[in-house]
Amino acid sequence: MIELIEEFNVLAAFWMTIKLALLSGLFALIIGTFVAILRLSPVAILSWAGAAYVTLIRNTPLTLIILFTSLGLWGQLGFEPASRDSPTFIVDLNFRLAVLGLSVYHAAFVCEAIRSGVNTIPLGQAEASRSLGLSFAQTLRYVILPQAFRGAITPLGNVMIALTKNTTVAVAIGVAEAAAALRNMIEFRPDVIFLNFFVIAIGFVILTLPLGLLTSYASQKLVVKR
Amino acid sequence: MSAQDVLFDVPGPQARVRHRILAVVGVLALLAMIAFILLQMDEKGQLAANKWTSLFEAAAWTNYLLPGIWDLVRAAVVAIVLSMGLGLMLAMGRMSDLLPVRWATTVFVEFFRAVPVLIMMIFTFFYLANQEWSNDSWNPFIGVVVGLTLYNSSVLCEVIRSGVGSLPNGQREAGLSIGLSNAQVRRSILVPQALTSMLPTIVSQIIVIVKDSALGYIILYPELLTQARNLSSSRGNVLQAYILAAVIFILINYALSKLAEAIENRQRRKAAGQSKKAKQDEGEGEEGGMAGYSDKTMEQNRQT
């Protein structure tokens, strides 16, 4: 097993998976929070735009979005987020396109997670803070947002776990992550095919299990007791 | 209660003016974005009429898109049926009175929930490709179905189990008190009710299955994405073909999500009606057991 891991550089592949997950997670959080703000805003057209984004993206397969970034955005529209002078042009390009696709896709789920966090807050909380004379900004800052983030921990954790697993789709545009490693391993060592599968599968268990435990620990620790 | 109620007061005259300004700015920003995209597309010649019209020729549909949709639906339906069956069995196993059975199913479920679907698809596909007895033309299909089934049956198992958990305790106790065994109570009282109450979640899971069957593209299964690629390589309209594929996916999944919503509303109405009737009958009203789930369960179970 060790020689297999060394021969096919499985650790490097999982490092790529982690990099994809962390970067896309960060961007998805930023885009998702922005979309959630749109969705929750009292202006009808903005909230409609947020809802449209979520509906469209959530019903499209991730495979399609990732392929589209490469074949459509780069291949047809000439969107090129990497420099051609760089010796690692193709690697950088595919990595960045994959991050773009993963972020855009998971932002829709981040938005829904944040919205469900806001939905856990009883109406009385906002009414009470208004009747205390807090301004809108103060209500958000001291009453609504602290509770909303705590309520959103579990769904956000689930999005992050799903994102980690979904990074495998990046193999469709040639990013050398865990799924690509599995394909290589099977191609060159078909005699130990079960072990190959096992190595990669355990890698994902190791990545996602602590995330799940951390999420449930944090959500229990930080739950707003009512 | 909607989020708007929490966050915002009823707007006064000043706030209404502010909202109107924001709305105008928002519309302008949206229009600017659309204009920018269209300009970019025009610059690269993507708006040329023949690139779009060739998508609607009869040959494009009969040779590529319809077979693609058919293969997509075929894989999804087989995977849904198998996952339901396996998921039910796993749920029974996880609730079993026998410790070894419970352990084995727990390990199975947790393992296959943690491993990406694509990894299982790739493994099954290459495993079959290395076997002499398997028919090569079936490998991609079986790969897609096995990958989808292993993952989704594990998810459905958890859905059913949480449905059983949300039933009122009296259901189980009543079953036991009329002399049914634990297994009989689960089989004929708890699981049927859990299945009904989790129906919306199960339909949302079908959307996940439909979306994930697009992963078949990577193991050469000729589903809609593969066919869109084939179509575009014969007509040179990659962008347009993928946009059309996306529209088809969105339509299918949007219809499914509306179905899930409709089922949920119907159940809520039914539960509300029952509790109203109970109120009239007994003079006191309690929320029916099945109303215990809200649309939050559905949203959260809607996996990425």
Image: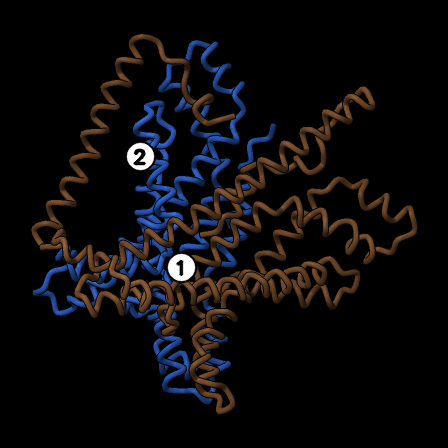
The chain displayed brown equals B
Residue at position x 59%, y 30% from top? Answer: A225
Secondary structure at badge 1 equals helix
**Residue reaching furthest to the bottom:** B132
Q: Which residue is mark 2?
A: A49
Dot 2 crowding, Cα within 10 Å, few <14, some 14–19, many 20+: some
Residue A184: x and y in percent read 35, 80
Residue at position x 48%, y 42% from top? Answer: B258
Image vertical order of residue A194 relative to residue A99, above or below: below
Q: Amino acid at mark 2?
A: Ala
Image vertical order of residue A54 relative to residue B303, above or below: above
Q: Chain of mark 1?
A: A
Instruction: Report the Cα–Cα distance between label 2 and label 1.
Output: 26 Å
Image vertical order of residue B259 relative to residue B265, above or below: below
Q: Chain of mark 2?
A: A
Residue B303: x and y in percent read 48, 51
